[in-house]
Image: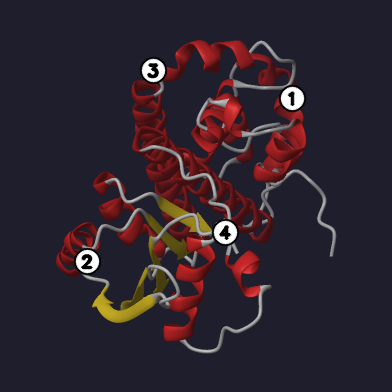
Amino acid sequence: MELIHPRCAGIDISKRDAKVCVRIAGSGRSKAVETVTTWSSMSGQILALRDHLVAEGVTCVVMEATGDYWKPFYYLLEDAGLGLMLVNARHARSLPGRKTDVADATWLAQLGAHGLVTGSFVPPAPIRQLRDLTRTRTAITRERTREVQRLEKLLEDAGIKLSSVASETLGVSSRAMLEALIAGERDPAALAGLARGRLRAKIPALTDALTGRFTEHHAFLARVHLDLIDRHSAALEQLTERIQDLMEPFRPFHDLICTIPGISTVTADIIVAETGADMSRFPTPDHLASWAGTAPGQN
């Protein structure tokens, strides 16, 4: 079997520590020497591991993508020129002979030494930062939507059918009516009179919709939901501002894909963050679709 990396290391990572196998190929007919050591997942130990691998002359380091535990190791080792390779755990486990953490590390070192695995795409630091921001924004957007849904359920419980008449539960008019309800206003006509713009044409329907049994209990919970929604909205604004600042180096690509029908500014932000704005990393459109999670699975 062809030897690609005479000095290779395999790292099996867990939450608390990592088993590291350094494999040094023998000369002539002598067998390779495989030494396995255990290193803590604390940053200080990872930096010591980096020095150890450099001292051993390792040119390829293979590690599995195990949860998020691989990240401290990868990020602290990537600047040492060790030829890091993050591999899909499924690809390595599909091969026989893996039973323990020590065996796992040894097996990874053997696979890397003979070039039997390929590394996954790990974007550079600026793209990783963008990805953290866009994914956080997506998560908070979902949480905000859930909070709006909880508010709507509360209004249904109080017999307030505001969402049946107003298209936006948190529009300017709807928000004014909700604030008035929380403040103690219970007269449906007075509440409906707070409508603005085109919604004033629906004042009779609003009067009916705002006739309910909104109590102090509902007012308390509505205040809680609205405050949470406002906090989510403020966080989303901060995230969007930060994303736009970090997007500047990728602005030409970002603006170009925004011209594609159906791709909004937010979607373009996500595409840049997830792909790195470098399509050359994907051999075919199928590879890109698979990376983006839009390809159907074959199980």
Find the distance from the CA under tag 2 to the CA under tag 1: 70 Å
**Residue nearer the viewer, 151 or 137:** 137
Q: Which mark is residue 113?
A: none
| Figure check: 229 above or below 299 | above
The residue under label 4 is 2
Find the distance from the CA under tag 4 to the CA under tag 1: 78 Å
Q: Position of residue 165 (x, y in %)?
A: 74, 34
* In contact (CB < 8 Å): disc 4 and disc 1: no
The residue under label 1 is 202
Find the distance from the CA under tag 1 to the CA under tag 3: 48 Å
- Mark 1 surroundings within 10 Å by alpha-carbon count, few (fewer than 14), some (14 through 19), many (20 or more): few
| Residue 99 location, quadrant | bottom right
Q: Which mark is residue 249?
A: 3
Q: Looking at the rendering, in which quadrant would you find the N terminus?
A: bottom right
* In contact (CB < 8 Å): disc 1 and disc 3: no
Residue extending furthest front? 28
Element at label 4: loop
Q: Looking at the rendering, in which quadrant would you find the C terminus?
A: bottom right
Find the distance from the CA under tag 3 to the CA under tag 4: 42 Å
